[in-house]
Amino acid sequence: MAQKADKEGSQRKFQQIMEDIRQRRFAKIYVLAGEEPYYADVIIEALSSTVLSESQKDFNFSVVYGNDTDAGQIVCLCRRYPVESEFQLIIVKEAQQLSSLQAFEYYLASPAPDTILVLSFTGKSLDKRTGFYKKLKDKAEVLESFALDEWKVPQWITDYVAEKGYRIEQDAAQLLSQSTGSSLRKIVLEIDKLFKGIDGKVITAKDVEVNVGISRDYNPFELCKAIGEKNRLRCFEIAEVFANNSKKYPIQATLGAMFFYFNQLLVIQATIMGGERDFYQASMKAGVFGTMRVREYQTAARNYPLFKTMNIISLIKDCDLRSKSNYGGSSDDGALLNELLSKILI
């Protein structure tokens, strides 16, 4: 619960920082850290394009790297006066590679009023025991980012694509998430590739297959479809491909897709038990759209009654735990997946 609250607080903080930047309400110091560097990238890009005009950047915009400098030199840069500009902007990337942060502790006591300093600690959390961290309160905007939960990735992709004026079909978002994992940097790169490679404003699963280089025949999405159909031969055929290429098809991504699939099926079944007679309406409430997708879930609902669906979700969670701990014993990922499929298809 605490981590969930931290993640939600981090998202609110990110949105608040972005809104302040849009309104030109700049902090004197930004400290960006945490597991997911994408949010730091977005904030840095927003500051770079908002604080200074292009003509002001020649003398007032500096980007330095932690392995090429030290905190004392950065503080000296911060003490300079801007040239024909209200502010100067100094961005420190890879700040986790700085040998010491002590000089910043003194700078925090009296930051330069016309300098905007950004410290980006890529993929690293801040040590809350240090004097530097303890002095940040009320002196800087601090964003501690968290990695996105894998089951939330398809919805994040859908929202991001919509913000850019496009639409992505649910199957395509699921397929893309299974290919990229939860790294938002990687996801955005692949989506930008899709924007350039498609005609029109709608991204389909075929577009993902062609432009991202995913085999539509062998992916977690197709495995879920085969499970829903109780197509044993197809299930174990896909599982064998996964077992022989575990780096391309990590079991955690496969289990995440299966959990998402059966969780949607569970919502549909619970909605129908609650009185909804129209399967299409129940599917939309579960986030399942499109005639082909709804028919796929109708087949799965016939093959797996409500309590069987609940049991499958429990089996998936158990397999996930075993894959991440020594509870799996000597079984490798391929063996764990085959065992899971056997239990589901009985």
Image (cartoon, helix red, strand yellow):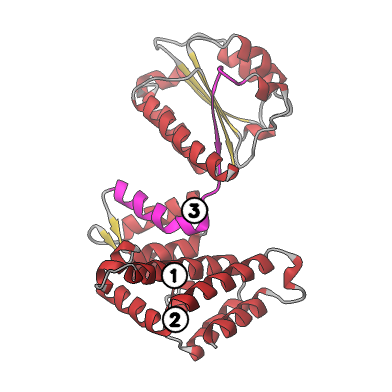
Mark 3 secondary-structure assignment:
helix
At a point 45% along the width and 56% down the height, the residue shown is 153
Q: Residue 304 bears which disc, if any?
A: 2
The kind of residue tagged 1 is: Tyr
Foreground pick, 228 / 238: 228
At a point 46% along the width and 39% down the height, the residue shown is 11
Give the answer, above or below, for where 76 lies relative to 290.
above
Foreground pick, 271 / 63: 271
Please indicate, yes or no, whether residue 16 appears anywhere in the rendered image: yes
Q: What range is drawn magenta here?
A: 136-164
Q: Earlier in the sequence, mark 3 or mark 1?
A: 3
The verdict on residue 147 being magenta is yes
Quarter holding the C terminus is: bottom right
Q: Which residue is mark 3?
A: 186
Q: Quadrant of residue 318?
A: bottom right
x, y percentage for residue 166?
27, 53
Please indicate, yes or no, whether residue 249 appears anywhere in the rendered image: no
> Marks 3 and 2, how far apart in space?
35 Å
Q: Nearer the viewer, mark 2 or mark 1?
A: 2
